[in-house]
Amino acid sequence: MGDSPTWNKGLLASKARRAIQGRYLTVAPLKRFATDSPGHAAMRRALGRVEPDEGYTAGWALSYPLKAVLERAAAQGRLTRAGLYDAVRRTEMVDYEGMLPVRAGRFSGGPDAQAFRESVIERPDAAQYSGLKVLTDFFAGGTARAHRLDTPCDRRA
């Protein structure tokens, strides 16, 4: 298994192809470049004609929290360090425009309530645009669901 940055469609053209197809799964915090969502479509329009790369997808999707904070600070006329800090503390929802589920944008409550614990699980498939076929759409296993984020990890017994 590999996290999303470990995947490269070029692996399907390598000598490792058979092993990759038979044994490899990727786990990603968001859906791939070709996904049909407003956020993915906006990303592709902004990029123009490029070779699909999940680095673009991750960079675009993970910029939404910063965008939300900057918009809040700008709306309050406070594009200062103090204004941005205040906007970070007051931002309770982030709209990922469909790149992540609505529940992933919830930033109210403590760390345990805010944590988005789901991943997309995919298997290599040369017939797919990105070279990956979704097996499980936004899934959280029992361990992820049960884990409590109530103590800093360096203080856990």
Image: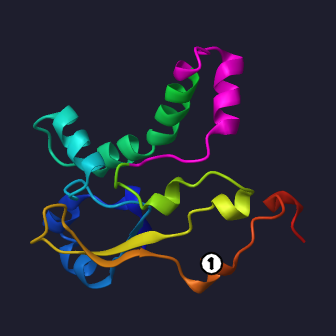
Total residue callouts? 1
Estimate the x, y position of residue 156 in percent, counting from the top left.
Answer: 86, 67
Quadrant into which the N terminus falls = bottom left
Estimate the x, y position of residue 24 in percent, counting from the top left.
Answer: 33, 77
Estimate the x, y position of residue 18 in percent, counting from the top left.
Answer: 20, 80
- Above or below, 82 against 59 in this view is above
- Above or below, 48 against 15 in this view is above
Position of residue 117 in the picture relative to residue 100 (left or right): right
Name the amino acid, label 1. Arg
Q: Residue at x 51, y 59 (%)?
A: 104
- Residue 114 picture quarter: bottom right
Q: Is residue 85 magenta?
A: yes
Q: Residue at x 19, y 61 (%)?
A: 130
Position of residue 154 in the picture relative to residue 3 (left or right): right
- Above or below, 48 against 54 in this view is above
- Residue 80 picture quarter: top right
Circle 1 SS class? helix
- Residue 122 picture quarter: bottom left
Quadrant into which the C terminus falls = bottom right
Q: Is residue 115 magenta?
A: no
Estimate the x, y position of residue 118 in percent, counting from the top left.
Answer: 50, 70
- Circle 1 is placed at which residue position? 145
Pick whichever, 136 or 128, lies toward us: 136
**Region of the chain picked out in magenta, as a range:** 74-96
Q: Residue at x 19, y 42 (%)?
A: 44
